[in-house]
Image (cartoon, rainbow, N blue to C red):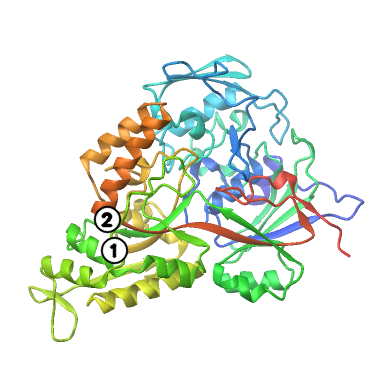
Amino acid sequence: MLAAALVASGCSPQPAPSRPVSTVHFDIPSDPTNLDPLFAHVDANGVEQQLARLAFEPFIDVDEHGRQIPVLLERVPLLANGDVSRDGRVITYHLRRNVHWQDGPLVTARDVLFTLRAIMDPRNPVRSREGYERIARADRLNDYTVRVTLKAPWAPAVATIFSYGTAPQYVLPAHLLEKQNNLAQSAFNAAPVGNGPYRLVSWRRGERLVYERNASYWRGTPAVDRLEVRIVPDPGTNLTLLRTDEIDWNLIAPAQVATLADKKNLRYAVTPLALVAGIAINTAHPPLDDVRVRRAIAASIDRDGISRKITFGRYLPIDTAQPLRSWAHDPDAKLPRFDPPAADRLFDRAGWLRARSGVRMKNGVPLALTYVQFPESITGKSVATVVQSELADRGVTVSIKFISNAQLFLPASQRGTLASGAFDLAYVPWSMGADPDDSFLLSCHGASNYMRWCDPTVDALERRAIATPDQSFRKLLYAQIERRVADAVPIVYLFNPSYVYAYRDGLSGFAPNAFLPTWNAAQWRMAPAQ
């Protein structure tokens, strides 16, 4: 069936070129569930987003320096160029006129309107419609111009719609999909036809995916002929593959950098991420609904020590959901600092007193918590061990439960651990969007509010922050949000990482941005083997 689908959707392999084939090899930590970006799943590594960006183009990309780049669009919509109305409700998008789908037809307004309908269609199990549900209407002005009217002003719109939102979407080919009744069961999900630099030619489930360059790519044919993507969950195996030159680049944990010091053909790219890692506290589980207990947990954890000892200072400590480089980051918002005596006092005030055994008890019940961690993260596993030890010092018993990256982030309907609330504490890396809107995380019904924490004041502030285009006013609102969250501690924020990617010196053009390492795969070049 898959082979037939590949042929039907234009993914049949091309004849081998006469010149040597240049190939870039890399791996991902889990097998994708779906290759249609409409149904992309969230996970700690952005697996499906990394692959989607190989085959699909966003409206707007962000380079390694954080600058916006129009991709499917001729220009970034702005108030200054007339593409954003003065009241912020109307956005006009001008599509490029030379972008083709990989099977031939041009990308047009028809595709944009179809995809917007597909995102909002309740029959489609889209992970999040965040942002898209704010669209009142979308109109085709001509084949290459779309006008979107929002229900109300929404400041993150330009940076989010078909760009780097917290649940990114890409324009899909209407000519292939608009007559299909059940997109969730479409052959397209395993054999997508995109408009990006690479097209899928094979997918051996659980083992590897192979992409070949798109000869009709609008920017010109990519220099690298072929991408071979292995599925390798074990980070130790990844390191071995890198050492033996079987892969050309890989994300490495800070603790792995020293082990590669003797590998002279490696270069390193250090990339500050739009990502914040922390420990989600399930406030629906007593006693974690007691702010004194949450603040005591935060005061028990030496976050500076974790940054220094586990990440060697590469992952800087943080106290809020706003990355350190974000204009919305408030340096004055502070979680409880590491202070064991203060933690003890807070636990005592909450009624959790030490028994003779040293374990804290209340009404004969020990204070015991389950901490979930995905084993694919070396850093995360080390953090779990430290947190377990530091809370044990305060009389709290912590059991670490390892859950795969994929299972952790599945929706509740598929018994995903976070979405179903089957945890007390959980290590979570949250990918933030290009805009500082963090309502997906901190509003009462946010898609990534795994903490089940609700503060009506924060909800009101979030609504105000996305309704105004005034950045200085938004900054003040986000500062208020950050301080309230730091006081309530639904999350013990740990760090804002700068990821380290190791890559072979024969690979040029490799420059990960704050969201994806594959965003500029069209610019990669591989030197011929010596």
The residue shown at (23%, 61%) is: 294
Secondary structure under tag 1 reads: helix
Residue 359's place in the image compared with 471, above or below, is: below
Task: Answer with left or right where residue 124 lies relative to residue 230.
Answer: left
Say which residue label 2 marks: 489
Residue 105 visible? The answer is yes
Q: Residue furthest top?
A: 141
Q: Nearer the viewer, residue 379 or 313?
A: 313
- The answer to whether the residues at label 2 and label 1 have Cβ atoms under 8 Å apart is yes
Residue nearest the viewer, comparing 382 with 44: 382
Q: Which quarter of the figure has residue 395? A: bottom left
Residue sitting at 24 percent across and 52 percent down? 487
Please state which amino acid type lies under the numbered disc 2: Val
Image x and y of residue 192, in percent: 62, 42
Q: Is residue 230 visible?
A: no
> Which residue is at 37% across, 21% downward?
151
Q: Which quadrant: the C terminus?
A: bottom right
| Residue, disc 1 | 298
Which numbered tag is attached to residue 118? none
Cα–Cα gap, marks 2 and 1: 8 Å
* Amino acid type of the residue tagged 1 in the rendering: Ala
